[in-house]
Every structure is written in C-alpha cells, then in structure tokens.
Amino acid sequence: MNRKWLIPGIIGGVILLIILIIGGSYNGLVSGRENVNRALGDIQAQYQRRSDLVPNLVSTVKGAAAFETDTFTAVTEARAKATSISIDPSKATPQQLAQYQSAQGELSQALGRLLAVSENYPQLRATEAFRDLQSQLEGTENRIAVARSDYNAAATSYNVRTQRFPTNIVAGLFGFDRSPPFQADPAAQDAPAVNFGQ
C-alpha cells in the first residue's frame, strides 16, 4: 500500500521543488529589475535637479557678464536637449543610455564653459547667490556620480543573476533581458586642456 503512493509522492515532490525554484528565480529577477529601474530613476532625478538649477545660474551670471551671449545660448540649448530626452527604465537600451549620456555630457560641457566665464568676473564670484548656486551644482554633480555608480551596481547584480543557472532558464522563458551599464562619455577619457596664459 505504501509503495503505491511512493512514486506519485516522489513525482509530486520533484514538481513542487521545480515550482519553488522557478518561483524563487522569477521573484528574484523581478526584484533585481526593479532595483535597476529605481537606480535609473535616481540618475534621472539628479539630472533633472541639475537642469532645474541651470536657469538660476545662467541668470545670475548673465547679470554680471551680459556680453557672453554665445555661452548663455550654448547652456540654454544644451539644457533643452538634455531635458527633452527621457528613458523608460523598463525598456532602456544601450543606445538610449548612450544618447541620454551624450545629451547630459553636452550640458556638463556647457556648464563648465559658463563657470569658466564666471572666473573672469570677481564681483560675480563674490556674490552669495552665485556661490550658493555653484555649491548646489557641485553637490548635484556628486549626487549624479553616486547615482550612476548605484545604477551600475544594480545592473551588474541583475545581469549576473540573469546569467546564473538555473535562473538563466527562467530569465529566458520570461523575457528578462540584461540591463545596459551606464558608461562614461568617451570624451571624458581625454584630459582637459588647461591654459593659464590668458
């Protein structure tokens, strides 16, 4: 009598074990993907914070350096381009991240030129409003760097999970794709030219 239930019991136990493995793998992948999405959202929030600071910084500098119109135009155009690109975290591709990073890089370069222009105006650098804005901008740049690092850590963890056995089988069955890393702008590898002769 006991033998009659032994084989169905073993089969039932194996099926239950498979269901538990698949369920655990699936839930782990969902958690990993959501961590990646949250981290990408954090990057976007920090870039938005920076974009929100730009008009105040431009108007503060514009008051002291009214004839630097090319610099102001470049910053305004770069900000408009950077804020026009958004990424859906659940559908992010390496190309979208590269395009987003490129637009943000252009804004970073334009802001760098704006801050360089401000160096020519000691009375501007002495104003409290400019110092506060510059400090907020520096803090935001630090937050952006931390957010990118957090995103890459979440993406790496998720990508490793999607490739490990047996989770890779579940990832393939349910369409869990790799998350692209957030890479630096290739121009960032070149050392900036510094000219103290002007």
Image (cartoon, helix red, strand yellow):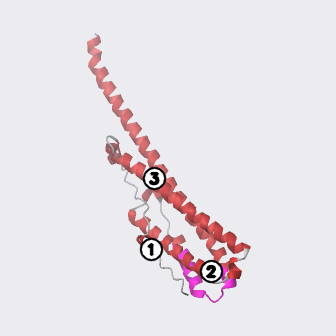
Amino acid type, mark 2: Glu
* Relative vertical location of residue 132 with respect to residue 66 in this rendering, above or below: above
Q: Nearer the viewer, mark 1 or mark 3?
A: 1
Q: Is residue 48 left or right of residue 176?
A: right
Q: CA distance from mark 2 to mark 3?
A: 37 Å
Identify the secondary structure beneath mark 1.
loop
Q: Main secondary structure of the magenta part?
A: helix
Which of the 4 quarters of the picture holds residue 51?
bottom right
Q: Which residue is mark 1?
A: 191
Q: How many residues crowd mark 2 within 10 Å: few (<14), some (14–19), many (20+)? A: few
Amino acid type, mark 3: Ala
On whether residue 64 falls in the magenta region, the answer is yes
Nearest the camera: 44 or 105? Answer: 105
Q: Residue furthest front?
A: 197
Q: Nearer the viewer, mark 2 or mark 3?
A: 2
Q: Which residue is mark 2?
A: 119
User: How many discs appear?
Assistant: 3
Q: Residue at x 46, y 45 (%)?
A: 31
Residue 29, percent from left and from top = 41, 45
The C terminus lies in quadrant: bottom right
Q: CA distance from mark 1 to mark 2?
A: 20 Å
Nearest the camera: 149 or 124? Answer: 124
Label pair 2/3, CB-CB below 8 angstroms: no
Q: Residue at x 63, y 89 (%)?
A: 67
The N terminus lies in quadrant: top left
Q: How many residues crowd mark 1 within 10 Å: few (<14), some (14–19), many (20+)? A: few
Q: Residue furthest top?
A: 1
Q: Is residue 75 left or right of residue 16?
A: right
Q: Residue furthest right?
A: 128
Which residue range is magenta in the image?
61-81
Residue 177, percent from left and from top = 37, 53
